[in-house]
Amino acid sequence: MVRSFPSLYAVLILALGMVACVPARKYEEADQRAKAMQAEVDAANARARDAVAEMEDLKAKEAMNAKRVNELQRDTTVLGNSLRQMTGQYDRINALNNELLDKYNKLLAGHGSENRKLLSDLEALRLDLMNREDSLNALGARVAQEQAALADTEARLATLQAELEAKDQAMKALKDRVSAALTGFEGKGLTVEQRNGRVYVSMENKLLFPSGSYAVDAKGRELIIKLAKAVESEKDLNVLVEGHTDTDKVQSGGTMKDNWDLSVMRATSVVRIMQESSRMDPERVTAAGRGEYIPVDPADKAKNRRIEVILAPDLEKLYELVK
């Protein structure tokens, strides 16, 4: 019995160690499942935002098409009224022509003063008939002009619709390309969204700047350079870089007076890096400071401190079509 006691003690120690390891493994497995579930939730939220943006674009297109349908219906009504007016004129001319033939037959059958009266009536009818024919020709010409104008409007509308669809597809492809280029940063304070025909790249300041500074750190430079490389080949793209701050006041005594200064200088720092690291046309790039006045979440200062890069297509050709 004395010889077997140490072995029993070792077994107890080993059993206690195994029991202590089990909760640790379960905790680690639960933590991994929680992280996986959170990733699925983030992906679902991103898909939901994309779906909402596409729905807004579809609503805008539907409103434009409805407006055009109303215009076409109005033009059709005008043409219908003109055609009815022309038909009425034609019927009156036929009636006058029949009356003229009747008087002419009476003229051939009559004589003397009665013939002179018939001749006078005949001349008056002839002049009236000529006037009505001139009026009918003018109305026909006006209808033809309106039909040509309507056809031209429909052609321009079709061209405009095709241009809008092409721009929308191009922006969708651009959004996918930017998202792919910035994959390692999404979900860490960076979002890429398409709405209102534009692509919005929002970067929280923690990805770019130290607190209260407008100098971009090394990780931020990497992010900005990847974004610039993703869009530098777009020749018809306007790039607006907006700086946003929270409501905390800038400390006095420095080079910056207030949040306006800070937001402008941060936007300018980002633009400089984009220009230095890519072939972007500087004429299409704008740096702007919005200060503290356009928060995305008044209750979350970290989200309000951000840089937004707004990628918008050049719509000059579309404006010409509308004119």
Image (cartoon, grey):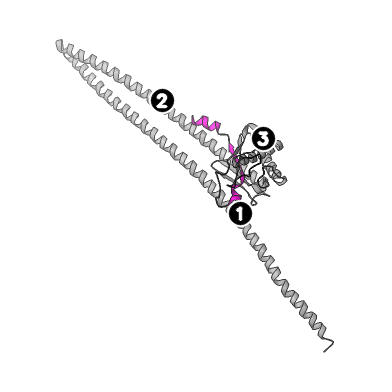
Q: Is residue 96 left or right of residue 237?
A: left
Specify whether residue 301 is painted magenta.
Answer: yes
Q: CA distance from mark 2 to mark 1?
A: 56 Å
Seen at 80% across and 80% down, the residue is 10
Specify whether residue 307 is painted magenta.
Answer: yes
Seen at 41% across and 28% down, the residue is 147
Q: Is residue 69 left or right of residue 310?
A: left
Q: Amino acid at mark 2?
A: Gln
Whole-percent x and y of residue 276? 71, 36
Q: Is residue 65 left or right of residue 290?
A: left
Res. 280 mark: 3
Q: CA distance from mark 2 to mark 3?
A: 47 Å
Q: Amino acid at mark 1?
A: Ala
| Of callouts 2 and 3, the N-terminal one | 2
Seen at 68% across and 66% down, the residue is 29
Res. 145 mark: 2
| Of callouts 3 and 1, the N-terminal one | 1
Q: Is residue 283 above or below residue 131?
A: below
On the image, numbered disc 1 is attached to which residue? 43
Whole-percent x and y of residue 131? 29, 18
Whole-percent x and y of residue 305? 61, 47
Q: Nearer the viewer, residue 17 or 232?
A: 17
| Of callouts 2 and 1, the N-terminal one | 1
Task: Say which element carries label 1.
Answer: helix
Q: Amino acid at mark 3?
A: Met
Task: Say which element carries label 3.
Answer: loop
In the displayed orientation, state which residue is furthest to the top.
112
Q: Nearer the viewer, residue 219 or 166?
A: 219
